[in-house]
Amino acid sequence: MSASSIPFSPLRKEIHGFIRSCETILSSPVLFGNTPLSPEERKIVQYYSEELKAYLLASQIQYTERRMQ
């Protein structure tokens, strides 16, 4: 799902920027002739992917707990 495909969604500026950055990374092999990420770039992307997963899980748990109160 691309940020541009959700024109009426009230996305925060930071979330919209994040989505655009992800779209750029995911399309970069096509745009830049299949240039793979370097080992260091892969480490950085992996690190932030794991951090984002943890954040999303924690926020989902908090949301669920609030709804149950």
Image (cartoon, helix red, strand yellow):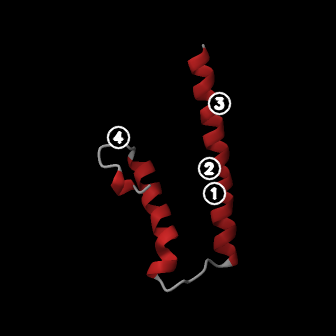
Q: Which residue corresponds to mark 2?
A: 52
Q: On the rendered structure, is 7 left or right of 15? A: left
Label 3 residue SS: helix
Residue at 63 percent of width and 57 percent of height: 48
- Vertically, is 57 above or below 46? above
From the viewer's perspective, is residue 69 above or below residue 60? above
User: Residue 15, which numbered label?
Assistant: none
Marks 2,3: beta carbons within 8 A: no
Which amino acid type is marked by label 3? Ile
The answer to whether residue 29 is left or right of residue 47 is left
Callout 1: SS: helix
Decide which of tag 1 and tag 4 comes sooner along the chain: 4
Q: Quadrant of the C terminus?
A: top right
Residue type, mark 2 in image? Leu
Of the two numbered discs 1 and 4 in the rendering, the one whose residue sits closer to the viewer: 4
Marks 1 and 4 in Cβ contact (< 8 Å):
no
Q: Which residue is drawn at the image coordinates 65% and 65% (left, top)?
A: 44
Identify the residue at horizontal 50%, vertical 62% (top origin): 22
* Residue 2 occupies quadrant: bottom left
Q: CA distance from mark 1 to mark 4?
A: 24 Å
Mark 3 and mark 4: Cα distance apart in space: 22 Å
Q: Are marks 1 and 2 in contact (CB under 8 Å)?
A: yes
Label whose residue precedes the other's in the sequence (2 or 3): 2
Location of mark 1 (residue): 48
> Farthest residue in the left direction?
8
Query: Dot 4 corresponds to which residue?
Result: 10
> For the residues marked 4 and 2, what is the alpha-carbon distance in whole angstroms?
20 Å
Q: Nearer the viewer, mark 1 or mark 3?
A: 3
Type of amino acid under label 1:
Tyr
Q: Residues within 10 Å of mark 2 (few under 14, many from 20)?
A: few
Residue at image mark 3: 61
Task: Name the element at disc 4.
Answer: loop
